[in-house]
Amino acid sequence: MGEHFDLLLAGAGHAHLGVLRQWAVNPKTRPAGHIGLLSADAHAWYSGMLPGLLRGRYALEQCRIGLTELCTAAGVELLLGQACGLEPAAQQLQVSDGRQLQYRYLSLNLGSQPLAPTQYGSGLELLPVKPFSAFIARWQRWQQQPQPLAILGGGAAGVELALALAPQLPALSLLTAGNLLDGHPPALRKRALAYLGKAQVVVQEHCRVDEAQGQHLLSAARVVWRGNRAVIASGASALPWLQACGLACDNQGFVSITASLQSSSHPTVFAVGDCASLAHTPHNGVYAVRQGPVLAHNLAALSEQRALRTYQPQRRALALLATGDGGALASWAGLTFEGQLLGRWKDHLDQSFMRRHGNI
Ligand SMILES: Cc1cc2nc3c(=O)[nH]c(=O)nc-3n(C[C@H](O)[C@H](O)[C@H](O)COP(=O)(O)OP(=O)(O)OC[C@H]3O[C@@H](n4cnc5c(N)ncnc54)[C@H](O)[C@@H]3O)c2cc1C
C-alpha cells in the first residue's frame, strides 16, 4: 500500500495554481486532511509569456512559478514525479518511479500534449512545445547553431511562436492543417498573415503534416518541407495513459466532466483545464483559470458534504496574441485589433497573473 492522501492534486495547471493560492491566502477555505500536489516539474510555466521569453523580452524566472513556496504556504505536500497510470476503482494514482499514491479525492489538472506526426528514420529532430522545460532546454541548444525551422500548427500558439522566433532563424515555415487561426474571426487571420509575411515566415495552410520521414515532412504522402528541426505546436491532444484508465472520456480522449467539474463516471475525481472535456469550454488557459475558484469551493464542499457549485463557461473570451515586437493582435466578440498598446496591456495582464501566484 502506498502513501495515502485525503486529497491529491495531479498537475500544477492553471486551475490548481488558483486553488493553491486561495488556500495560501485564506487557509480557512482549505479542506482538512493530508493534501498532496504531484507535479512533473518543480515549476509551473506560464504559456502566455513563453513567446516573450523566446524573443528575449523576459528572463526564465519571470515566466515560471516556484511550487515549493506556493505549496508550503498552502499547507500542501509537493511530490515531484510523473503520473503514468490511474486506477479509479482502487483510488490509486501511479507515478513513473513506481510510487502508488492512494487518494480519497483526486483532482486532475495535467494539461494536454501537442499531436506529433508519425516519425520514420532519423535526421529530423521533432520538438513538442510541451512540456515547456524540455522545450526551452532544447531550444537554448538549437539557438547556438541556428538552422531553418518548421513549426507545425497554425493556432494561436504556432503564430506566436513563429513571430517570436522568425528574427532568430535563417528561414522559418509555418504549416497548418486548415486555415491559419481556424476558429478565430477571418480578420484576425488576415492581420496575422500580414505580420508573418513581414517577418518572412512561409505559411502553408491546408497542409496537415502526418509523417516525418528522414529529413522530410509529408502531408498525404507529398513532401512539404525538408530540414533538420521542427517544433510541434499542433493544439491540444489527450494524454494517452489518462484516456486509457477507465474514466469516461469524450471521443478525443479528454476526461468527460459535469458542470461541478467532477468526472462524469467517477465523482470522487475532478478534472479541469485542457485534460477535461465540457461543452462550450475550449482548451485554453483562460478557461482553466476561471475553473479554479469553482474547483476550490467544490473540493472543500464535497469532503464536508456541502452543496457543490456549477461552473459556467464564459460565452466569449479575449484572444491576445503577441506579435514578437512588443505589440499584440486581439480579437473580442468578432472584432479584431492590433498594436503596441495591446502588447503593453498583454504584458500587464501576464505579469499580474505571475505576481498573484508567485508572491505568496
Ligand atoms: C506557446 C503557447 C502560448 C499559449 N498562450 C496562451 C494564451 O496566451 N492564453 C491562453 O488562454 N492559452 C494559451 N496557450 C494554451 C495554454 O497553454 C493551455 O491551454 C493551458 O496551459 C492549459 O492549462 P491547464 O491548466 O490545463 O494545464 P497546463 O498549464 O498545461 O499545466 C499542466 C501541468 O501538469 C503537469 N503535468 C503534465 N503531465 C503530468 C504528469 N503525467 N504527471 C505530473 N504532472 C504532469 C505539467 O508539468 C504542468 O504543470 C498557449 C499555449 C502555447 C503552447
Image (cartoon, rainbow, N blue to C red):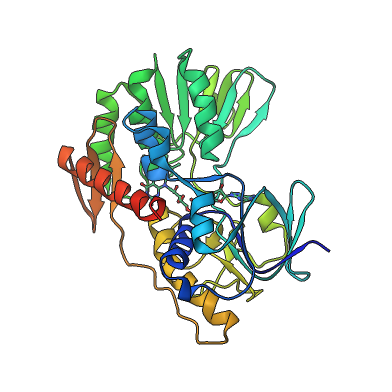
- One can see residue 154 in this view: no
Residue 231 spot, x, y in % from top left: 50, 30
* Residue shown at the point (60%, 21%) measured from the top left: 124
Compared to residue 121, the image places residue 30 above or below, namely below
**Relative to 211, is 95 on the left or the right?**
right
Residue 150 spot, x, y in % from top left: 47, 25
Q: Report the residue that reaches farthest toward the right.
A: 1
* Residue shown at the point (37%, 40%) measured from the top left: 49
Quadrant of the image containing the N terminus: bottom right
Place residue 340 in its image quadrant: top left
The front one of 214 and 317 is 317
Residue 336 spot, x, y in % from top left: 20, 48
The front one of 225 and 42 is 42
* Residue shown at the point (48%, 62%) measured from the top left: 20
**Relative to 30, is 336 on the left or the right?**
left
Compared to residue 276, the image places residue 105 above or below, namely below
- One can see residue 186 in this view: yes
Quadrant of the image containing the C terminus: bottom left
Q: Report the residue that reaches farthest toward the bottom.
A: 306
Residue 238 spot, x, y in % from top left: 59, 52
Place residue 8 in its image quadrant: bottom right
The front one of 2 and 359 is 359
Compared to residue 46, the image places residue 150 above or below, namely above
Q: Total of numbered circles in the picture?
A: 0
* Residue shown at the point (24%, 24%) measured from the top left: 198
The front one of 322 and 141 is 141
